[in-house]
Amino acid sequence: VKKLLNKVVLRESCFYRKLTDTSKDEENPEEIESSPEEIFGNRLLLPSPAIKQESKTSEENVGLIVYNGAMVDVGSLLQKLEKSEKARAEMEQKLQSLEEKTGESDFFLLIQKVLRHIISPKELALD
């Protein structure tokens, strides 16, 4: 390393432009023969795509996904959805039963009024 540095360093300073820039007058640039290992660089040291796919499948089994920058647990959201659907169905049934009860009570009140002759037939027609 020291030998290489001594070639490019003058008076303890290295001029990067002199190393990278070449004149346009040179028609014959040096051709360097490179081995396939040098061409690929460090790509051979990187993990293969198959390993990345395996890690993705393990993440899918967990049920976590990234949505708008936040981790979302799909399983728990589905459970919450089922609970809310059950609660909604129960509330609808209670509402229907209350409507039936109020409808029946209104009907019975009307019958009682008619039987007691409290209201006249004109008032019945208005209701």
Image (cartoon, helix red, strand yellow):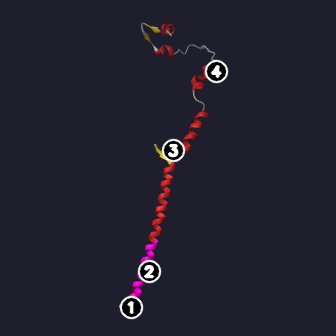
Mark 2 lies on a secondary structure that is helix
The residue to which callout 3 is attached is: 65
Q: State yes or no: discs 1 and 2 in contact (Cβ < 8 Å).
A: no
Q: Is residue 47 left or right of residue 114?
A: right
- Point out the tag, 4 or 3, that comes first from the N-terminus: 4
Graded by Cα atoms within 10 Å as few (under 14), some (14 to 19) or many (20 or more), the crowding at tag 3 reads some
Q: Nearer the viewer, mark 3 or mark 1?
A: 3
- Point out the tag, 3 or 1, that comes first from the N-terminus: 3
Mark 1 lies on a secondary structure that is helix
- Point out the tag, 4 or 1, that comes first from the N-terminus: 4
- In this view, 75 is above or below 2: below
The residue to which callout 2 is attached is: 104
Quadrant hosting residue 34? top right
Q: State yes or no: discs 3 and 1 in contact (Cβ < 8 Å).
A: no
Residue bounds of the magenta highlight: 96-116
Q: CA distance from mark 1 to mark 2?
A: 22 Å
Q: Nearer the viewer, mark 3 or mark 2?
A: 2
Graded by Cα atoms within 10 Å as few (under 14), some (14 to 19) or many (20 or more), the crowding at tag 2 reads few
Query: Would residue 127 be seen by someone viewing this image from the given angle?
Result: no
Mark sitting on residue 122 = 1
| Amino acid at circle 4 | Pro
Dominant secondary structure of the magenta stretch? helix
The residue to which callout 4 is attached is: 36
Quadrant hosting residue 113? bottom left
